[in-house]
Amino acid sequence: MNIAIVCYPTFGGSGVVATELGVALAHKGHQVHFITYGQPVRLSVFHKNIYFHQVYMEEYPLFRYQPYELALSSKMVEVVREYRIDVIHAHYAIPHAYAAYMAKQILLQEGISVAIITTLHGTDITLVGNHEYYKTAVTFSINASDAVTSVSESLRKNTYDLFDIHKDIKVIPNFIDIEQKKNAPKRCQRAMLANPDELIITHISNFRKVKRTPDVVEIFYQLLPHKKAKLIMVGDGPDREHTQALVHRLGLQNSVIFLGNSLEIDEVLCSSDLFLLPSESESFGLAALEAMAQGVPVISSNAGGIPEVNKQGYSGFLSPIGDIEAMVQNALVILKDEATLSRFKAQALQQASLFDERKIIPMYEQVYEQVVSRRKE
């Protein structure tokens, strides 16, 4: 099957999932065409059956903001024509599903039919899409899609609650390649991150306000009287400066390391003992899943889709949003002794295996086959 994947190429969860999906589909023999404004950060240069089509925009003084949706639709039309695309898989309702619909209408004028699948990832629904300026367009884009999926049951419910949606939304969770994680050469270098007698606690995010990164620092600060540890903060975003200022106020400069955006996530996680995710909002919690796949138990909030990933008392613990004291106490349960920590690490890996790509990718393939067969009827 010839599949076009439209996504953001950045470090965000939707771009990561879209890229990993494309790579997995290519390994199974599908022809995959990424259409976006930059090469996805998780996509290496050499991949069989994968093509990258960059969306370019000309600077034009008439526009205050360059019309990316128009350029994106035009590029989709071009790719569908040239490569006989069966399915356009849009990750994010806007602008991707909206632009895909416009491309589909242009192609229909030429007698070319292409199916559109929209995957909802979270922010496109709960934040951007629910804004009064965009709500009508988002509603239309979802209803106009040939099939719609969401990454969690929580997000599916939110979409129905917030929008007038008539389409069936199928839940297909995010996934991870467990076998690849197990078999990949381990490049864990704990000595580069902490002293031999220190635990390594990690947080990975885009440092937006909803991630509550100051809570991460507060949890770590309250753990230090009980356990020797280092905190590794991976990522970048608007709340990073505020979080770093808190680290300085608490005198933690020698105990907290900010790595910024990094492609060496596995190298950090395989050295970690505990992962913190106290988010105010999470449609799924992909960072938690990536941690669990490296055998790292998770202390998290119970926001959104996180309880569908992090199993209470098994792969980690869930607490109410902002309940720092509960998160500290739960962390101390896991870090009680070496035997308890080892047990939680094994259980985290076992829980992550439920989301192995070999179980999830066929669910997407089934959706592709259904929309393509309906198109040919």
Image (spheres, helix red, strand yellow):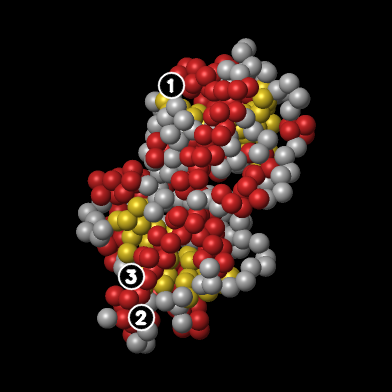
- Cα distance between the residues tagged 2 and 3: 15 Å
Q: Earlier in the sequence, mark 1 or mark 3?
A: 1
Residue at the image point whose x is 55% and y is 52% from the top: 177
> x%, y% of residue 41?
61, 56
Q: Earlier in the sequence, mark 2 or mark 3?
A: 2
Left or right of 53: which side holds 68? left
- Say if 184 sits above or below 60 in the image: above
Is label 1 in a helix, a strand or a loop?
A: loop
The residue singled out by tag 1 in the image is: 323
The residue singled out by tag 2 in the image is: 113
Q: Earlier in the sequence, mark 1 or mark 2?
A: 2
The residue singled out by tag 3 in the image is: 370
**Residue 184 can be seen in this image:** yes
Is label 3 in a helix, a strand or a loop?
A: helix
Categorize mark 2 by other alpha carbons within 10 Å: few (<14), some (14-19), many (20+).
Answer: many
Is 349 or 198 nearer to us in this picture? 349
Left or right of 84: which side holds 221? right
Residue 126 sits in quarter: top left
